Amino acid sequence: MSKKTIKELAEEIGVSKTAISKKVTETQKKKWFVKIGNQFVISEKGQEAIKSMFDPVENNQSQTQTKTSWRNNLNQFSNSDFYQKQLLAKDNQIDMLQTLLKDQQNLLDQQQRLTLQTNKQMEQLQLESTKNTEDNTSQKDSYVPNAETEKETEPAQTKEAFFSRLFNKKK
């Protein structure tokens, strides 16, 4: 391992130069950093120490990513479980509505049959009533014409007499 600049070490670790500068204290800088020209060069001991400082960050990042992926999986499972329960509830609701619809159709069918039966009974009663009135009128008609014929014969005689009296005509 050779001495490296802050930039080279930052690229190797995968962090920024400012992250390294913030992580290293002033006393550590005095121990590990040597200024050569316009650049700070880090000793091998300092490079190892700085790498170890950022290793837990990488581990933390991987742990965070693992936790995040675990949470995402858990959320997907929860969502899937939620959607599954929701689908079951919808299926139950559909079954209930279909049963209710069948019951309503049966009630409607019964109502229509009852209405049809009632209408037939009403028609039958009307026919019977019409027959009864026709029978009554035919009985009255048969009885009345006999009476009328008797009345017609009598009034005809009285009419003649009445007219003859009125006009003094005799037959």
Image (cartoon, rainbow, N blue to C red):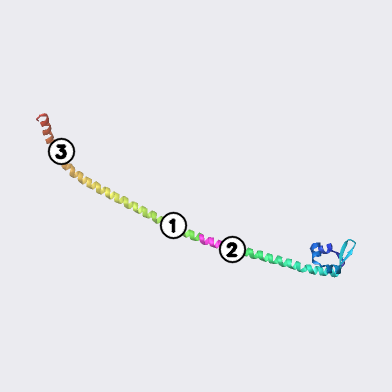
Q: Residues within 10 Å of mark 3 (few under 14, many from 20)?
A: some
Q: Between disc 2 and disc 3, whose residue precedes?
A: 2
Q: Which residue is mark 3?
A: 152
Q: Between disc 3 and disc 1, whose residue precedes?
A: 1
Say what amino acid the circle numbered 2 marks: Phe
Q: Is residue 57 above or below residue 136?
A: below
Marks 3 and 1 close (CB-CB < 8 Å): no
Say what amino acid the circle numbered 1 marks: Gln
| Label 2 residue SS | helix
> Which of the two residues, 135 or 111, is positioned nearer the viewer here?
111
Q: Between disc 2 and disc 1, whose residue precedes?
A: 2
Q: Is residue 69 above or below residue 155?
A: below
The residue at 82%/70% (across/down) is: 49
Q: Which residue is mark 2?
A: 82
Q: Main secondary structure of the magenta part?
A: helix
- Magenta part of the protein: which range? 84-93
- Residue 162 % position (x, y): 12, 33
The CA distance from mark 2 to mark 1 is 32 Å
The residue at 18%/43% (across/down) is: 144
Q: Quadrant of residue 166?
A: top left
Say what amino acid the circle numbered 3 marks: Glu
Q: In the drawing, does residue 125 fall left or right of residue 26?
A: left
Q: Which residue is mark 1?
A: 104
The residue at 18%/42% (across/down) is: 145
